[in-house]
Image (spheres, coloured by chain):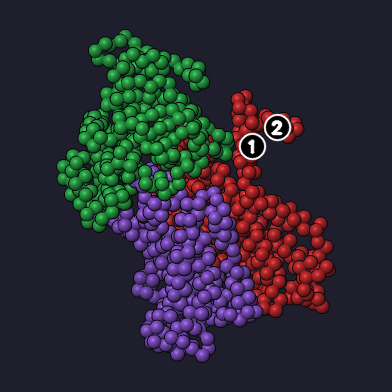
Chain colours: A green, B red, C purple
Amino acid sequence: MLVDINNLHISFRSRTGVFEAVRGISMNIGAEKFGIVGESGSGKSVTARAIMKLLPNNAVIEADRLAFDGIDILAADEKTMRGIRGKRAGFILQDPKYSLNPVKTIGVQIAEAWYTHKGGTRREAMQAAITLLDQVKIRDPKAVAALYPHEVSGGMGQRAMIAMMMAPDPELLIADEPTSALDATVQAEILRLMEDLVSSRGMGLILISHDLPLVSHFCDRVAIMYAGKVMEEIRAAELNRARHPYTRGLLECIPSLLQPKEQLAVLNRDPAWMNP
Amino acid sequence: MTTQTFREWALDETPSSRRQASWGRRYRIWLNLRSNPLAMIGLTIILLTVIVSLAAPLITVYDPGAQNLYNKLAFPSSEHLLGTDELGRDVFARILYGGRVTLGLVVAVVILVAPVGLLIGCISGYLGGLADTVLMRVTDVFLAFPRLVLALALVAALTPGIESAFIAISLTAWPPYARLARAETLTIRNSDYIAACRLTGASKFRIILRHVAPLCVPSLIVRATLDMSSIIITAASLGFLGMGAQPPSPEWGAMISTARRFFYEQWWVAAVPGLMIFVSSLAFNLLGDGLRDVLDPKQT
Amino acid sequence: MKRRAKTLAGILSSVFITLFGLLVVTFLIGRVIPIDPAIAAAGDQAPEAVIRALRTEMGLDQPIWVQFYRYVVQILHGDFGASNVSHNLVTSDIARYFPATFELAVLALLVSSLLGVPLGVWAAVRQGRLADQVIRVVCLAGHSLPTFVFAMLSLLIFYKTLDWLPGPGRQSIFYTDMVPVFTGMITVDSAIAGDWDAFFDALAHMIQPVCILGYFSMAYITRMSRAFMLHALHDEYIITARAKGLSPATVIWKHAFPTVAVQLVTVLALTFAGLLEGSVVTETVFEWPGIGRYLTNALKNGDMNPVIGSTLLIGVIYVSFNLLADLLYRLLDPRVR
């Protein structure tokens, strides 16, 4: 098992009190494509960041077990974590406009990820960065490497982000809403690129999204989260046979071209889902 | 109404009147501020200084101007708590009465300047165009001088004295308020509820006065509190350079200026007003810093 | 390219308007607000005839806009008039006194930024912890400190009582006027001349004023660095940098700091201009023969030409440092370049 989560709780302390964002979830993820779906505030992003231990200082993480490839993350110190972050698990954020450093060129940022974990000279690292940019199908990698993030489009920025996280050859890629900030036409390309890279390198992928059909299309298994809990975990191919009313509700809200409906269903949230 | 019921009334989650809602908001701000020890220290010092200087005649029997040449430059004693100055005047009494001068000046400047700056900034930011350009160029010119230097030159052109100091400090103090109010206005003016006001036919001035200006007030209060500390310093510097309050006025800066001549021998005569300037200015800074955390969280 | 030229033209035109505004304000202060500048210039004991002659000579019988025109023409020709007390030209006085202030301000800026920036970064990284609270109080105290009191106390302790540091003034009497003048800055001049005794003497004299001016501006620099860093540390690219497995030091200094460094350039430029203001009071206490003491001496004598001259000079320096900061910002930040 790459990621082993058992009864994970995450809460945030603030001046006004404690807010519990994740309330006891469990999942086991191997070298597969695993999707986590939920609306905003369901705790999916927080869960992903907890695996990397990238939560702000006021977050409290508790779990019976939270491990990456057998390493206990709750007990791991900063140094151990640095051996996991980047090197063994990459993390792709939502919007390249904010997640790339605005005052460093794309090439420098990718090269940095490479030599931090693989060593070597800056020149070799820059060469590797250009090769990586080529692998994420950027047409003129040498020119793009010299650009600043604000000079490229969102799709290209996200490709650069993927290249950066692929640089140290990690075993797992966590993508937190990687396409939500992009144009609809670019979304599919980016996802297909990620899928290609992940499959060809035999990596694990955790894809976090609010888009249920999209996730089920690209993933092997899907966990559906609501209000800090996992409602249902199901094989993506069997999504039509989902039993949980929340999942069913979500599916019914989606308009379909093949089976047009007079009126789309409205999701009725059952308070009982909060405390199953 | 007892405090307990006021607390419940103010913290009611579903206020039944506008008044209750706004008191609830104020009370919550106060509760937040109260949890900041540094800000409370600042507030306590300010209140103490105000009370003590207003109640000066009740606290000391000495007249701040009464000279006693037989007992000059006396070391602090039970008779004269902080000693006497070069003319035998009681330093403690002069400190207390001096507080009136300093605090009076500070309050007068802020009361005059903050609303003017607010109005100029809001008008400039809301109307935009030519009015904005002209008003902002004028503030630029005033901001182009260091405050103390411009105040000094102005006082020199008038006649040195507390009134001139007031005019000079006021003239140099308003531009930052205008700048701040303008920046706030620019973020507010394109919001949907301002558009809604406009659609209901509210006039420009009604929008500025009733909808834009009140939203600029919190950050302006923070700014004013922090500004009071620098006004204290500017006023004291003017006094120290002989350009502010004139002797025999017990203004703290002017006291230091005269005591400077014999500072190496009788240092306490200058050190006490110096300490007062520092403490009162620090108090306003502490309070302002705490207020900023509460009222203007995006600034921290 | 065209857009850049346009913004440059916009900046320059606003600078010119501001400079023109400076002229208007100084004109008002020097010629309009005083009830009778002629009496102010000649002294109130001067005979009526002298004052009347002076009034004609100063052009006070002309309409105000003619007076203003003459004033602007004079200033543009570099004519700031002469002091009524020493009868020296204001321009030559300023040339003599300014290097002393410049020397002080540069050293103070160096000290305050070398201390202030790391302190601010540290406070931001340790936000809410003890170090942050201590730094916060130290900075607030720096903002609240009347520099003249601090300067007097420092002299009392380190000069009069402990005798560790030299007293007021720029040099010991022994070295006065011994160093050939190149720049007017004694440390630089003595270094050029190779006179190291004079160099260290001058440096020792600078310790107290530099520390006092430096503390005041350090408080400002620290506060601004802390605020900028806090902002940067909350940005998403910091998460990216940490997710790459970089060390905390690399994240702070190579990812967060470069994005705020550009803003800090602006802060440093403003600090330097602010140091000129601080020098007015500090120089008075330390009897430092700089522009600040020149200004206050002239103020005491009601000598308006030097007052206007030095006020205008400080204003122009203020504006040009703002301009410099603006241009540097545009040059250094890839986002606006």
Q: Residue furthest left?
A: A139
Q: Is residue C312 visible?
A: no
* Percent coordinates x, y for residue B1 in the rendering: 75, 31
Q: Is residue A195 visible?
A: yes
Which amino acid lies under the numbered mark 2 shown in the image of this protein? Phe
The chain carrying label 1 is B
Q: Which residue is mark 2?
A: B6
* Percent coordinates x, y for residue C299 in the rendering: 55, 73
Quarter where residue A165 is shown = top left
Q: Is residue B119 above or below residue B1?
A: below
Q: Is residue C162 above or below residue B130?
A: below
Residue drawn at (60%, 79%) of the image: C159
Q: Nearer the viewer, residue B66 or A161?
A: A161
Classify 10 Å Cα crowding around label 2: few (below 14), some (14-19), many (20 and above). some
Q: Reading the chain from its start, which is encountered first: label 1 or label 2?
A: 2
Residue drawn at (49%, 89%) of the image: C175
The chain carrying label 2 is B
Q: Are marks 1 and 2 in contact (CB under 8 Å)?
A: yes
Q: Which residue is mark 1?
A: B27
Secondary structure at numbered mark 1: helix
Q: Nearer the viewer, residue A122 or C292?
A: A122
Q: Residue furthest top?
A: A262
Which amino acid lies under the numbered mark 1 shown in the image of this protein? Tyr
Quarter where residue B278 is shown = bottom right
Q: Is residue B92 left or right of residue A11?
A: right
Q: Is residue C74 above or below residue C242?
A: below
Could you give the CA–CA distance between mark 1 and mark 2, rounded to whole angstroms?
A: 10 Å
Secondary structure at numbered mark 2: helix
